[in-house]
């Protein structure tokens, strides 16, 4: 038995879904633990592309139990579309279970998200406009609606009769937006009630049974470490704990049940939305990474900002998540590059102080510039390589240097978007447990 947490080690879109798909083969249950339809997860199987926002990509395997856990926020309209599109592709969704404790995104949450971004002007976060922040705000203010409320219409009406005057006052007076009647929101909820009635289940009990039966649970992360509400580049973050700790709180089980934590990083870095990004390339090289890597968001279609791999970010993620090993995806994007850079330190422009760790203060970041090492490219396609030995020497050197800098094994390498375009260097689940000391 091995219960595995998979997390993004950068700012999201690291290629987590492809690694989840790989690891799902050996899992019995796959659990989404946080975030909502801000996530966009792409899996390519035999050149067929599947895009997921809420449902764990493990649903592609016919025999796996898939769970949307308590820590997530669910937009019922998006969930409905996702279910329909899977059914159209003849993929059974009968094994999807949803926690009654998960919170629900309603139309006014999306209005508030858009309104906040407009009002913020140049201080905007660059959110996905999916209502994520406002849904989590209501959850923490303890005024949110949960999945279980959809199955008790009388309670739902009572809650809405109390909530809507409050939301309408804000919508009208502060945001200058249209309001909703209780009936409108109630009818919206009733339209999607059938989904929750069908899929709602006692997730704690399911997990407890799975643990007792020594089944394998895979906790599928969304977003990434640097977007974590507490430990990311605040305020340019999402509204949930997208680092490994979020798996325990979001699924609802204690940390002793986690056997292994696996991080996913691209061979470079991307970021969507605003916020600090030390190794960002606003030049032709950045554009080349964007074009070759097709770096446009799965959820919003926005162009992703691109830059060199940042070992300080990676090291921060190693400690914060207690990573046992790392998957490095999209190495093939560098196939035509003459040279590749790796950020190994930051230098303070004001006094030349060097940092070999990711600094905690967000105010300091604006004074820091990356210090790079440069590596020669391999100038050949690696898309058909299926073992570490088959990789060109320069690609091996680049990976070995990353491994040295982050202090944990690179267990998986992505060499293309297809399911089979993956190199497994060492068993990511049953490999040796690493020492908990980190490289600082
Ligand atoms: P996630 O949010 O972390 O699951 O990542 P996304 O699915 O949003 O973005 C990753 C994109 O890169 C997707 O379009 C994947 O199909 C693609 N991808 C994943 N791994 C590789 C890889 O190793 N090479 C290439 N070229 N593309 C990859
Ligand atoms: P996956 O799971 C990349 C970013 C947004 C924005 C910030 C806050 O596909 O890796 P939000 O809508 O969450 O309030 O936006 O977080 N963001 C992501 N960036 N991948 C994601 O998910 C993201 N989910 C949120 O772009 O900068
Ligand atoms: Mg994504």
Image: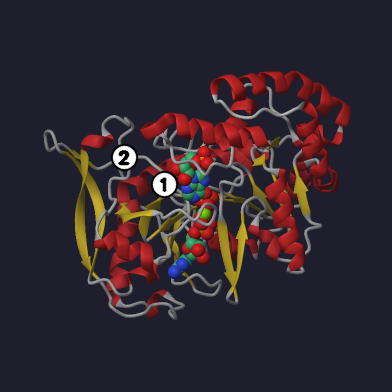
- Ranked by sequence position, the earlier of labels 2 and 1 is 1
Q: Is residue 220 left or right of residue 164?
A: left
Q: Residue at x 31, y 62 (%)?
A: 287
Q: Secondary structure at mark 2?
A: loop
Q: Is residue 427 left or right of residue 152?
A: left
Can residue 302 be seen here? The reply is: yes
- Residue 69's spot in the image, x, y percent? 69, 42
- Which residue in the structure is indicated by mark 2? 358
Cα gap from disc 2 to disc 1, whole angstroms: 11 Å
Q: Is residue 277 left or right of residue 422?
A: left
Q: How is the rendered protein coloured? A: secondary structure
Q: Residue at x 58, y 59 (%)?
A: 20
- Residue 204's spot in the image, x, y percent? 75, 39
Q: Is the C-beta of the residue carrying label 1 under 8 Å from the nearest atom of ligand 1? A: no
Q: Residues within 10 Å of mark 2 (few under 14, many from 20)?
A: some
Q: Is residue 126 left or right of residue 201?
A: left
Viewer-nearest of discs 2 and 1: 2
- Which residue in the structure is indicated by mark 1? 318
- Residue 428's spot in the image, x, y percent? 52, 61
In the picture, residue 202 is in which quadrant? top right
Q: Residues within 10 Å of mark 1 (few under 14, many from 20)?
A: many
Residue at the left extreme of this rendering:
351
Of residues 330 and 412, the one drawn nearer to the viewer in this rendering: 330
Q: Residue at x 59, y 27 (%)?
A: 137
- Residue 131's spot in the image, x, y percent? 59, 37
Of residues 333 and 160, the one drawn nearer to the viewer in this rendering: 160
Of residues 366 and 339, the one drawn nearer to the viewer in this rendering: 366
């Amino acid at each position: 038995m091995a219960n595995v947490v998979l997390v993004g080690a950068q700012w999201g879109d690291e290629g987590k879904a492809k690694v989840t798909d790989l690891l799902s083969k050996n899992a019995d249950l796959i659990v989404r633990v946080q975030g909502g339809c801000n996530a966009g997860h792409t899996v390519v199987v035999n050149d067929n592309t599947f895009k997921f926002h809420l449902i764990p990509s493990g649903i592609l395997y016919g025999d796996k139990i898939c769970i949307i856990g308590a820590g997530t926020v669910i937009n019922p309209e998006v969930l409905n579309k996702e279910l329909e599109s899977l059914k159209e592709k003849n993929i059974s969704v009968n094994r999807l279970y949803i926690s009654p404790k998960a919170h629900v995104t309603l139309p006014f949450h999306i209005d508030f998200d858009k309104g906040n971004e407009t009002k913020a002007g140049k201080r905007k976060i660059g959110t996905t406009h999916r209502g994520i922040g406002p849904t989590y705000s209501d959850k923490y203010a303890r005024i949110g609606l949960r999945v279980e409320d959809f199955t008790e219409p009388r309670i739902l009406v009572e809650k809405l009769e109390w909530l809507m005057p409050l939301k309408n006052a804000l919508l009208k007076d502060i945001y200058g937006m249209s309001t909703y009647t209780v009936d409108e929101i109630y009818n919206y909820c009733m339209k999607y009630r059938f989904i929750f009635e069908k899929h709602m289940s006692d997730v704690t009990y399911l997990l407890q049974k799975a643990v007792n039966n020594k089944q394998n649970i895979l906790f599928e992360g969304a977003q990434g470490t640097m977007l974590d509400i507490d430990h990311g580049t605040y305020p340019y973050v999402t509204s949930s704990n997208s680092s490994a700790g979020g798996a325990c709180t979001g699924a609802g089980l204690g940390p002793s049940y986690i056997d292994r934590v696996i991080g996913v990083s691209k061979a470079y870095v991307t970021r969507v939305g605003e916020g600090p990004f030390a190794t960002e390339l606003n030049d032709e090289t950045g554009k080349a990474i964007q074009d070759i890597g097709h770096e446009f968001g799965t959820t919003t279609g926005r162009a992703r900002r691109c830059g060199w791999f940042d070992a300080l970010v990676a090291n921060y993620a190693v400690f914060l998540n207690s990573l046992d090993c790392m998957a490095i995806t999209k190495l093939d994007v560098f196939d035509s590059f003459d040279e590749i850079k790796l950020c190994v330190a930051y230098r303070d422009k004001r006094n030349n102080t060097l940092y070999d760790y990711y600094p905690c203060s967000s105010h300091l970041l604006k004074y820091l510039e990356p210090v790079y090492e440069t590596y020669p490219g391999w100038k050949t396609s690696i898309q058909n390589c299926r073992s570490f030995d088959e990789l060109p020497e320069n690609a091996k050197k680049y990976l070995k240097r990353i491994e040295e800098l982050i202090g944990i094994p690179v267990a998986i390498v992505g060499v293309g978007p297809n399911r089979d375009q993956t190199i497994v260097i060492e068993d990511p689940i049953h490999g040796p447990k690493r020492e908990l000391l980190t490289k600082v």
